[in-house]
Amino acid sequence: MEFAGLNASIVIRAKNEAKDIGDTLDSIFQQVLVPQFEVIVVDSGSTDRTLEIARQYPTRIIEIPAESFTYGRALNIGIKAASGDQVVALSAHSLPTDKTWLANLLEPFTDPTVGAVYGRHVPRSNATHFELFGMWLSGVTSDKPRRQQRDMMFSNANGAYRRQLALQHPFDEKIPGAEDLAWADWIERQGWVVCYQPTAAVYHSHGESLGRLMQRMVHDQPTIWGLKLGIIARRREQQLQASRAPAYRK
């Protein structure tokens, strides 16, 4: 099946990704069954050959200062610049495993109740035992599809969402990590379905030591516990209500 009506924008957040971004872009531009898509690279101050390599492909590059970077902010900038009905978030070091990755990632959007989709992570050979355990625990290595309405799991390393939904409820730019989980929690609270699509697979792992893995967990845990306790959802609702309120004029 060819998804002619599902135009997509692929947003890649990057900083010093020269080692992998060329392979990733090679794979993206070999995708089949999705004839219309664009690639936007949001770079936050690379000092290696990342930008030089990205400019060798038909990409749109947006540069932001490194000091202004947060995961949510970089994504929101890419989403605003995008023109596709669906926006795909892909890490520069997430390498699609085959030529139908994009078509498989977009396929669940034919269901109007689906607001977001994320795909499988296939560990690279550098994955440590600790990292493999964490990936297994999160469910991103599973080969079984899932429909989520109460599970906040999602991944911006290999995920997609309806652009209008992401514009309506942008990613939180203030939290230090797990902005993807916070966003998934929000849309599920609004009645949307999040799908896990194992056939949309990428090679992705960091080769992290136990110490680095613990740092990442500490980085994300405040957001995760805030979600479990409902604190972040209430704060975001208050922020949205304030933004919708009419401005007071004398």
Image: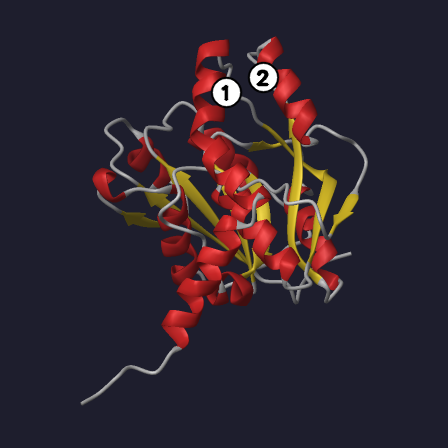
Q: Amino acid at mark 1?
A: His
- As drawn, the residue found furthest toward the bottom would be 250
Q: Does 142 sit left or right of 32 as displayed? A: right
Q: Residues within 10 Å of mark 2 (few under 14, many from 20)?
A: many
Q: Which residue is mark 1?
A: 206
- As drawn, the residue found furthest toward the right would be 144
Q: Does 244 sit left or right of 139 as displayed? A: left
Q: Secondary structure at mark 1?
A: loop
Which quarter shows the C terminus? bottom left
How many marks are shown on the rendered structure?
2
Which residue is at 56% across, 65% downward? 85
Q: Which residue is mark 2?
A: 131
In the rendered image, residue 95, in percent from the top left (x then y), is placed at 56, 31
Q: Amino acid at mark 2?
A: Glu
Question: Quadrant of residue 131 in the image?
Answer: top right
Rendered view: 124 above or below 169 = above
Which callout, 2 or 1, points at the residue further toward the start of the chain? 2
